[in-house]
Each structure stands twice: as C-alpha cells, then as structure tokens.
Image: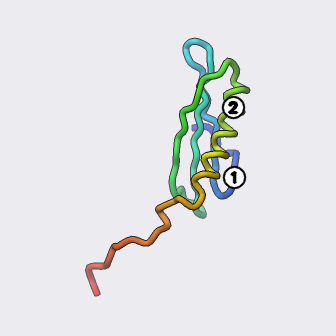
Amino acid sequence: MGSLRNTYKGYAFADMTSQNDDGRFRARAAIVALEGTRTRSQRFLDLETFKTREEASARVHAAAIAWIDADIGRDRLALPTNFSTLID
C-alpha cells in the first residue's frame, strides 16, 4: 500500500493510483480512520481513469477529502451496543 502521508480530520489517506495496460492511470485511494495507535476502519475508493498520474493523483486527493467530510459523524463503531456480560 502507498504511504499514508496525507492526514485530514483524524483520517490518513494514501494515493494508490496504478497504471493500466493501456497506459492510462486508475485513480485509487486508501483511507484509514485512526484512533490513537490503532486503525479503527479503512476504506478503498476506485475512481476514474486519467491520461496522467498527476490528474489521477489530484482526483484521489479531492475524493479522499470529500469522502472524509461526508463520513465524519457517521462512524457507527463508536455507538453503544446491546452487549451484556455473561457474568454478574
């Protein structure tokens, strides 16, 4: 996986763009929600193809930011559960 050098609002994301057989570049992003030193969740976005790596990378950055902004507050992992212990 690419390096998670980009951080935004408690998330880290990496540009996973790859070159297709036809020479075009498939824009891909890996997004990780962090909680201290552990990974809370991760998402992968497969986006459009572009003529240049620079165009694909710009799309990855914009898409990752947009996804993070839309996801904030919808993370269901922090909600309470109905789990109860078996031992009183």
Q: Residue at x 63, y 53 (%)?
A: 11
Is 11 positioned to the left or the right of 83 in the image? right
Q: Residue at x 60, y 57 (%)?
A: 72
Q: Residues within 10 Å of mark 1 (few under 14, many from 20)?
A: few
Q: Residue furthest left?
A: 86
Q: Residue furthest front?
A: 70
Residue 10 screen position, x and y as percent = 65, 58
Give the residue pinned by disc 2: 57
Name the one closer to the observer, 61 or 32. Answer: 61
- Return the disc, 2 or 1, that comes first in the chain's sequence: 1
Q: Residue furthest bottom?
A: 88
Is 73 positioned to the left or the right of 55 in the image? left
Q: Residue at x 59, y 27 (%)?
A: 48
Residue 70 screen position, x and y as percent = 60, 51
- Where 65 falls versus 56 (above or below)? below
Please name the amino acid that badge 2 sits on: Ser
Residue 33 screen position, x and y as percent = 57, 54
Secondary structure under the numbered disc 1 in the rendered image: strand
- Where 45 falls versus 12 (above or below)? above
What separation in Å lies between label 2 and label 1 (alpha carbons)? Answer: 16 Å
Quarter of the rendering occupied by the C terminus:
bottom left
Secondary structure under the numbered disc 2 in the rendered image: helix
- Where 30 falls versus 78 (above or below)? above
Residue 51 screen position, x and y as percent = 67, 18
Name the one closer to the observer, 39 or 45. Answer: 45
Please name the amino acid that badge 1 sits on: Tyr
Q: Residue at x 47, y 68 (%)?
A: 79
Quarter of the rendering occupied by the N terminus:
top right
Give the residue pinned by disc 1: 8
